[in-house]
Image: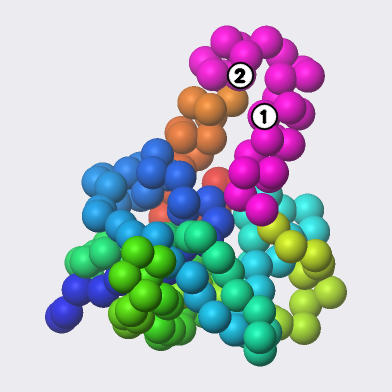
Amino acid sequence: MANGNVFVYGTLLADEIVRILIKRVPSSCDAVLADYHRFSVRNRVYPGATYRKGDRIKGKKVLLDLTHEELQVMDDFEGEEYKRLTVEPCLLDQSITLTAFVYVWGDPEDKDLFGSWDYEVKLFRIFVSFFLRSSFQEWRSNDLERYEAMCEEYMDTGINVT
């Protein structure tokens, strides 16, 4: 089966998470996805995107040339909340489009979708929350490792570990 590209706009922007899931960090390029909006999802640290004419998800990236097996891992990781669609994001440095998959929120009318989700802002809020509870060194040694361990356990067992 052919390899595929994946437009990512949330937690999969973090190379560390991608490496845990597929055991490598594939080549990528910056891209924009037209006619979609990236929402915050109530009580979740990750976003959900849905079709929204005239909007766009800016400055994110496309992971290039994922194998069929890696795409299956992505499908499993995203779970039933998301649907995989084929889209044509525009590459920022070349102003051309390429075919890629994107994982969109399964229910575009979900009342838990609100506002916008910003990767840097969300990470900053998570960092501040952890920092207020413990020193940075404790966070680095405890919380980051726990999150990475959760991702690794997911990969090992394929079950929901949250």
Name which residue type carries label 1: Phe
Q: Residue at x 26, y 64 (%)?
A: 64
Which of the pair 34/75 is nearer the observer? Answer: 34
**Mark sitting earlier along the chain (2/1):** 1
Marks 1 and 2: in contact by CB < 8 Å?
yes
In the picture, measured across the screen, residue 21 lies left or right of residue 145, that is left
Which of the pair 89/136 is nearer the observer? Answer: 89
- Which label sits on residue 127? 1
User: Which of the image's four quarters has the N terminus?
Assistant: bottom left
Residue 105, by quadrant, is bottom right
Give the residues drawn in magenta, as a range: 118-142
Image coords of residue 67 (percent x, y): 20, 67
Was residue 124 drawn as part of the magenta stretch in this picture? yes
Image coords of residue 147 (percent x, y): 53, 35
In the picture, measured across the screen, residue 23 lies left or right of residue 130, that is left
Badge 1 local density, few (<14 within 10 Å), some, or many (20+)? few
Q: Residue at x 46, y 74 (%)?
A: 102
Q: Which residue is mark 2?
A: 139
Colour scheme in use: rainbow
Image coords of residue 51 (percent x, y): 63, 84
Name which residue type carries label 2: Trp
Relative to residue 5, is residue 124 depicted above or below?
above
Q: Residue at x 74, y 62 (%)?
A: 116
Q: Residue at x 68, y 44 (%)?
A: 122
Dominant SS in magenta: helix
In the picture, measured across the screen, residue 79 lies left or right of residue 99, that is right
SS class, disc 2: helix
Asked whether residue 72 is in view, the answer is: no
Q: Determine the residue located farthest toward the bottom in the rendered image.
A: 53
Was residue 52 drawn as part of the magenta stretch in this picture? no
